[in-house]
Amino acid sequence: MGSHTHRRLLPALAIMTLVMGCGSNFGFPGAYRIDVEQGNIVTEEMVEQLKPGMSRRQVRFVMGTPLVEDTFNPDRWDYHYVKRNGTKTLDENQLTVFFEGDALVNVTGSDLPGWEEDTTDVADDEA
């Protein structure tokens, strides 16, 4: 009787172990997944405060510490933000600021300041 019960439990335990090991990809019906925010939250108000010629210190004051300060390109700061729920991306944005010396000269990304959008429109018109 003891060995007969073990034969039934062994496959059930093996299946449970496999399902639990794949829990992050498999997902249990009705299980709640929290939203995970990573990176720099960049608001439109913050971006609009950026002006050409601002010093690095002023940009850091407005935007906060960049997520990436490239050692090989010290004149580029990257502000990246992503919000996920499990494997599903809910929101994502990228903003990169460029300096020449200590002065802000360019901004690229998903949300641009008004002065940067104006120069983009002029460049498109000239082409």
Image (cartoon, rainbow, N blue to C red):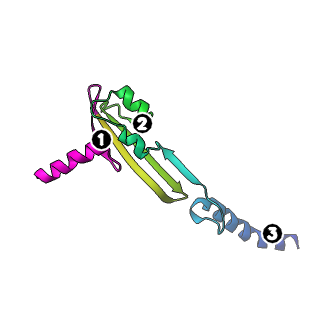
Q: Is residue 10 above or below residue 110?
A: below
Q: Residue at x 66, y 61 (%)?
A: 20
Q: What residue does disc 3 label?
A: 6
Disc 1 on helix, strand or loop? strand
Q: Is 98 placed left or right of 32 in the picture?
A: left
Q: Which residue is mark 2?
A: 63
Q: What span is colored magenta in the figure?
A: 99-127
Q: Position of residue 60 (x, y in %)?
A: 41, 31
> Whole-Å distance between the Cαs marked 3 and 1?
66 Å
Estimate the spatial distance between the alpha carbons at disc 1 and disc 2, rounded to whole Å: 12 Å
Q: Please tell me which of labels 1 and 2 falls first in the chain.
A: 2
Q: Quadrant of residue 104?
A: top left
Residue type, mark 2 in image: Met
Q: Which residue is mark 1?
A: 107
Given residues 4 and 37, the one toward you in this image is 37
Where does the image place residue 113, in percent across and percent down from the top left? 32, 44
Q: Position of residue 13 (x, y in %)?
A: 73, 66
Q: Please state which of residues 4 and 94 is positioned toward the viewer in this rendering.
A: 94
Q: Quadrant of residue 55?
A: top left
Q: Classify residue 32 as left or right of residue 72.
A: right
**Label 3–label 2 contact, CB within 8 A:** no
